[in-house]
Image (cartoon, rainbow, N blue to C red):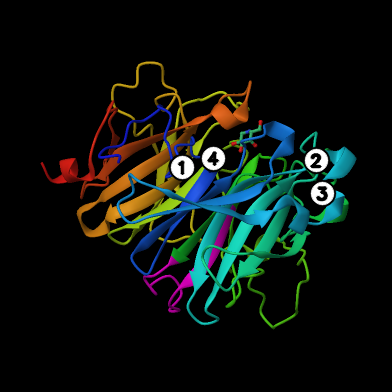
Amino acid sequence: MNHSFTPGQIWKDDNGKHISAHGGGILLYNDRYYWYGEDNTKGYYNNTGISCYSSTDLYNWKNEGLVLKQEDMPPELWGENLGRVERPKVIYNKKTGKFVMWMHAEQKGYAFSMAGVAVSEHPTGPFEFLFCDRPVKYEPERGFDSHTNEEELGNSFRDMTLFVDHTAENDGEADAAYVIYASEGNWTMYIVKLNSDYTWIDLPEDEGRIRPQFTEAQLGLGWSRQFIDQMREAPALFYYKNQYFMITSGCTGWDPNQAEISVSNHLMKPFKRLGDPCINDHKQTTFDSQSTFVLPVNQEKGEFIYMGDRWNPNFLGASTYVWLPLKIHPDIQAEIHWKHSWQIEEFSE
Ligand code: DGJ
């Protein structure tokens, strides 16, 4: 049994194997936590699909197996193209009763850069893969990214997260969901509102799965561009006292860099950059990690868990996890402190 978090160490599941749920995120459903991530046990270009682990205490995780297998994804993604799926996130749709997964579907060379969408009746799958596509087309001032063929295929879709807005304050609608992703060849981050079943983006009329060509005029109407030309990735979004916070990293491949936290009172308005939330992080590398998710522990009190990946580029399967306490103070000061070992109770000490 585990009784604490030990950031950066091997973290074993109920079978005694190192957990493989990288670039992951957590869904709390019926008092159980589900941790979804990249299964990298076989390495970089052999990721076998999306893994899931479940827990009631966040320290001990039961391996629920692959909830979306490589063989259940479009064959054109794999084969010679050496496909891989990164940073999957799952949200629950109360209206449809379905679990919806979005992921970054990729191939060797990082030019494919598509969103993958899958659904399931159960949190532990199996997920049915629906499609790969790019949600938005928009020509930024610097022009379309040619490496990812944005002019033809729409704006690229890479590091991503999902966020369900339980506040209803955003646009008067409860449980609106958003996909947040690095686009424009990673130059700019997008926040795009999802439709009511969370399987595509929200369009004015139910137009099916079309990719709208946006102009400046659509900005703020279910779509915002954040950190324009700033090259941010690894977004993790959370909410505290009428403010939306986002942690992002810089763009340095698998090497860790300095995190930044930003805040906005509306998802369609620009996020203001507040700087590095890590305290006494002398190397300025987010304690040797890259953000992937922020899990609320006690949202009212500003208590969250920062979840990051400590990537091992030589063998991705050996990458570890850096989970640390993240505290937001009422004056919106954010703090992440390093701990060799810690427990959730320490928030209230
Ligand atoms: C950094 C991203 O955050 C990861 O998800 C992955 O895409 C690597 N880059 C690939 O170099």
Residue 185 in percent (x, y) is at: 72, 40
Dot 4 surroundings within 10 Å: few (below 14), some, or many (20 or more)? many
The N terminus: image quadrant = top left
Q: Residue at x 70, y 55 (%)?
A: 115
Query: Mark 1 or 2, which is nearer the eye?
Result: 1
Query: Mark 2 or 3, which is nearer the eye?
Result: 3
Q: Quadrant of residue 11?
A: top left
Residue 225 visible in rendering: no
* Relative depth, front residue between 343 and 69: 69
Dot 2 surroundings within 10 Å: few (below 14), some, or many (20 or more)? some
Quickly name the residue at label 2: 111
Dot 3 surroundings within 10 Å: few (below 14), some, or many (20 or more)? some
Query: Mark 1 or 3, which is nearer the eye?
Result: 1
Residue 88 in percent (x, y) is at: 59, 51
Q: Which label sits on residue 77?
A: 3
Quickly name the residue at label 1: 15
Q: Amino acid at mark 4?
A: Ser
Q: Which label sits on residue 96?
A: none
- First to last magenta residue range: 165-180
Residue 22 in percent (x, y) is at: 54, 40
* Relative depth, front residue between 16 and 297: 16
Separation of disc 2 and disc 3 at Cα?
Answer: 12 Å
Q: Residue at x 82, y 45 (%)?
A: 78
